[in-house]
Amino acid sequence: MNILITGGAGYIGSQLLRALAEDTQVDRVRILDNMQDEKFQSLMNLPGGHHYDLVLGDVRNEDDVRRAVGDDTDTVIHLAALTNATLSFDRRDDTELTNYVGTQNVVRAVQQAPHVTRLIYASTTSVYGPTSGTVNEESPCNPASPYGEFKLKGERDTLALAKLTDGRVKPTALRFATVYGNSPGLRVHTVVNIFAFRAAVGIPLEVFGSGEQKRPFIHVNDVARAVAFCLQEPRTEGESFNVVGENASVNDILALIEPRFPRMQVRHTNKEILNQISYQVDSSKLAALGFAPEQTLRDGIEEFAQLYGAFTRTPLGVA
Ligand SMILES: NC(=O)c1ccc[n+]([C@@H]2O[C@H](COP(=O)([O-])OP(=O)(O)OC[C@H]3O[C@@H](n4cnc5c(N)ncnc54)[C@H](O)[C@@H]3O)[C@@H](O)[C@H]2O)c1
C-alpha cells in the first residue's frame, strides 16, 4: 500500500502513523498537513519499516491535494479538518471551507486518480445530534453544530465515490466517538483530556448541569487500530461505522479521575453549551466484523495520572 494521510500530524494521525508501522503491507506513507498546529513532534521518532513523505500543503487547495495524491497513491485516509465543534459556531465559514470544501477536493482528486482504490473518511458521532436513547448507523442524523453538519455532508460525498467510479474506489466512513488518551500530537480540547490536565494541576473542572449526560468515547490507540482494521477488512467497504469504546456520563469520568488526581476540583455551571447534549452510540456493526477496542476510560485516565505524575502524587500545595 502507498498511503496518503491528510491531517497526519494531528492527534489521531500521529498515532495512526505508529499503528501503520506494524503493517508489513505498507510501502509508503505520505502526510498532507499544513502544520497549522505546529505539531512537529508528531513527525519525530517515527518507526522504520517503510518510507515517509510530507507534503506541506492545504486541503483547501485542490492543487496541493492532487500533488499529495500523486501518481502512485492507492489508499487515502482523510483526517484533516478543523476539529473544535464548539468553535465551529463562530467559525462556520472556515469550518465549511476546511471540512467540506477540503473533503470535496479530496473526493475529486481521488475520483480523477485511477490508481486510488480505497478511501477512509474520518467522520464523527456528532453527526447524530441530540437524541434520546441509543443511536446506530441507521438512526437519523441531525447534527447540532456546523462541525457535525459539514462532517455529515463530507461523509455523503465520500460514500458516493463508489458509484461515481463504478466501484473502483471503496470508501468507508468511520464515525469516531470523542477521542481520549495520549498521542504524540495530543490535543486537549476533548473532555477527558482537558479534565485530566485540569485535575492534575488543580484548575476546577467545569461540569455542565447534572453531569448525568452520556457521551460515546474511544481511546486514540483504538481509533488508529480501527482504521488499520478497515484497511484489511473488505466488508467495511462502502459503508459508515460507529467507532466507540464505551458510553459514559461526565459523572462516570469524574469518578474515575477523582481517586488518582488529588488536586481535582469541580465547578458546576448551567451555561447552555454543546457539552450538555446527551446521547449514546451503538458500535455493534463494526464489532460484528471482528473489531474490538482494547482500552477503557479507566486505562486512559490511569495513563494521564502517570504522565502528570509530578502533579498527581501530592495534593494542591499553595492557594
Ligand atoms: N479527536 C476527536 O475526538 C475526533 C472525534 C471524531 C472525529 N474526529 C475526526 O478525526 C479527524 C482527525 O482529528 P484529530 O483529533 O486528529 O484532529 P487534529 O486537529 O488534532 O488534527 C487535524 C490535523 O489536520 C491538519 N489540518 C487542519 N486543517 C488543514 C488544512 N486546511 N489542510 C491540511 N491540513 C490541515 C492540522 O494541522 C492537524 O495536523 C478529524 O477529521 C476529526 O473531525 C476526531
Image (cartoon, rainbow, N blue to C red):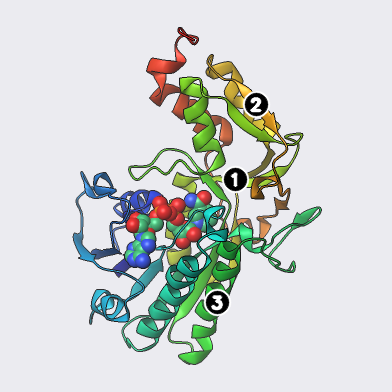
Q: Which kind of residue does numbered mark 2 sit on? A: Arg
Split into quadrants, the picture shows ligand 1 in the one at bottom left
- The residue identified by callout 3 is 238
Secondary structure beneath label 1: strand
Q: Position of residue 109 (x, y in %)?
A: 35, 83
- The residue identified by callout 2 is 267
Could you tell me if residue 300 is visible in this image?
yes
Q: Position of residue 161 (x, y in %)?
A: 49, 84
* Earlier-in-chain disc, 2 versus 3: 3
Q: Going 45% across and 90% down the picture, which residue do you hit? A: 165
Q: Which kind of residue does numbered mark 3 sit on? A: Gly
137 and 65: which is toward the camera: 65
Q: Going 56% across and 20% down the picture, which residue do you hit? A: 264
Q: Are marks 1 and 3 in contact (CB under 8 Å)?
A: no
For the N terminus, the quadrant is: bottom left
Q: Quadrant of residue 50?
A: bottom left
Q: Is mark 1 within 8 Å of ligand 1?
A: no
303 and 63: which is toward the camera: 63
- The residue identified by callout 1 is 217
Is 37 displayed left or right of 274 in the figure?
left
Secondary structure beneath label 2: strand
Q: Position of residue 118 (x, y in %)?
A: 41, 75
Q: Are marks 1 and 2 in contact (CB under 8 Å)?
A: no
Vertical side of 183 occupied by 311: above or below: above
